[in-house]
Image (cartoon, helix red, strand yellow):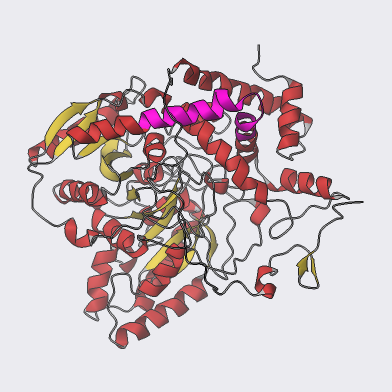
Amino acid sequence: MAKLNREEVERIAELAKLTLSDAEKDMFQEQLSNILEYAEMLQQVDTTGIPPTTSALPLNNVMRADALALSLPNDEALSNAPDAEDGSFKVRAVLD
Amino acid sequence: MELYSLTIHEAQAKLRQGEISSVELTESVLERIDAVEAKVGAYISLQPELALRMAEMADERRAAGEDRPLLGIPLGIKDTIITHGVPTTAASKILDGFIPPFDATAIDRLRQAGAVFVGKTNCDEFAMGSSTEYSAFHPTRNPRNLNCVPGGSSGGSAAAVGAGEALGSLGSDTGGSVRLPASFCGVVGLKPTYGRVSRYGLIAFGSSLDQIGPITKDVEDAAILLNAIAGHDARDATSLNAPVPNYAEEIKQGDDLKGIKVGIPQEYFTEGMEPGVAQTVRAAIDHLAGLGAEPVEVSLPNTGYGIPAYYIVATAEASANLSRYDGVRFGLRQDGGDMWNTFRQTREAGFGPEVKRRIMLGTYALSAGYYDAYYLQAQKVRTLLRQDFERAFEQVDVMVSPVAPMVAFEINAKVDDPLQMYLTDVLTVSLNLAGVCGISVPCGFSEGMPVGLQIIGPALGESAILRTAYQYEQTTAWHKQPAVL
């Protein structure tokens, strides 16, 4: 039995804001199920008392001086915008 | 000898003596590209006119008395690295047409050093893949055998160097993406310690794993390129504030490996390994012993959990990093009538199948009800993998293994079987999870294709792995057998 059912594939796709085609849903249901079955082996590892690693670095709370510095000029920041108006990124209405 | 076939340090000597100009060197590389690029497909975009202008500027700087190791040297840059004014796509349709308004720090440093940029090299989309077949534009072919993949994800960077289409290149390595293609193409590739090279301007895949690294024809060139890009950067909070040794000088200290303990992690010689790969690497270990190194059997007992831990952590980070591609500020926008459908349709149209697969996997691993079982557990296993390395490096100076259990495979062999593709990375991912450094150096051939020796060092152990690699290379001739195209 596949690890993921169709509804779970659709739920994940919606969380990730992907509209998958039916063919993609079929493919991902099978492939992701295989990968997750393989990843099940992680459950065999005894990690009692082992802290998680979020970064391999021995760094914490890296600070910099609170000083003014140059930033991208407005027109350059907008130079790749699909749509822009009055110095701003233009998008579809967020609230109706 | 054609100029394009020179190493960086050979070209540097000729430039310094006035035997050649950077324009001549760059023209030779551009002519080589004209001759072989149709077969290899190493580049996504080429900037020949810009390259010649940069070469002219380098010649002017030299005429004015400047003399730096990369002054006037033509390089290829992986298309996951941001270049001001030059299209940067990460091999994805979602960034088609994106022209960055700034430089990555590594690029900024190469510009200051006077390097010449020939073009942006092909890779798997957003660096997600092990064969460069997941590029949204075209696959790259291995210059050693055009029916085979160059490895990935920095396959274009490795193929360009292997084919003489650049004197050196930059790649990026999240789970093996510099070392694997270097191994498959018979060139040198170095993944620095996490934090050694700034990630500012490297298009993010797995932010706790990503590092930019050099791909070159020999070890000295890798040291030269690393020297140019390494060092602290205030714009990357995960950048290490540690001094940068002169690697290019340090590699030449001593003329043997006496006193160096070389660990052989038994778990890195797996059952499924191609026999020719195991034999070739065993012979390389004997060669290191002949140079005075002391081989020591060591154990990295959690190695078998590297692939699942990596693919959970990396895809979880990727699913967050790639949420920025929503069609608002840059890249593709596919209008869907309202805001949410615009996001959905932009992402559906812009991302390729492997990127979607990884976003799906990472989103699942982070989602309510599965977070503890997958993501948190993978991060705990990551701690165990780090501890494996820490314990091993209490006993030895460096460790050696193959880069991959196989040589370059044929195009299309794994492209429809994602799990088989992921297993290609079984000997490389743990270094990224642990944050340590590694280099791939050519050590022979199996079934006619190159085998890479992986030399692994502790955090900030770049001098040790480069020196070991240099001693190995200088007493062998594998790096002097370029691809014939």
The residue located at (29%, 74%) in the rendering is B68
Which quadrant is home to the N terminus of chain A?
Answer: top right
The residue located at (24%, 32%) in the rendering is B392
Give the residues drawn in magenta, as a range. Answer: B362-385
- Name the residue nearer the viewer: B164 or A57: A57
Image location of residue B421, percent across then percent down: 50, 32
Residue B372, above or below B284: above
Work out which residue is located at the far front of the displayed protein and give it.
A66
Work out which residue is located at the far top of the displayed protein and give it.
A1
**Residue B161 within the segment the image draws in magenta:** no
Residue B334, above or below A35: below
Give the left or right position of residue B273, taking residue A91 as reference. Answer: left
Give the left or right position of residue B54, taking residue B334 as reference. Answer: left
**Residue B376 within the segment the image draws in magenta:** yes
Work out which residue is located at the far bottom of the displayed protein and give it.
B64
Indicate the quadrant where residue B8 lies: bottom left
How many dots with numbers? 0
Residue B280 visible from this viewpoint: no
Image location of residue B427, percent across then percent down: 36, 32
Give the left or right position of residue A6, taking residue B156 as reference. Answer: right
Indicate the quadrant where residue B344 lies: top right
Image location of residue A51, percent across then percent down: 43, 30
The residue located at (30%, 55%) in the rendering is B217
Magenta span main SS: helix
Residue B462 visible from this viewpoint: yes
Work out which residue is located at the far right of the displayed protein and give it.
A96
Residue B313, above or below B95: above
Image location of residue B301, percent across then percent down: 32, 23
- Name the residue nearer the viewer: B332 or B137: B332
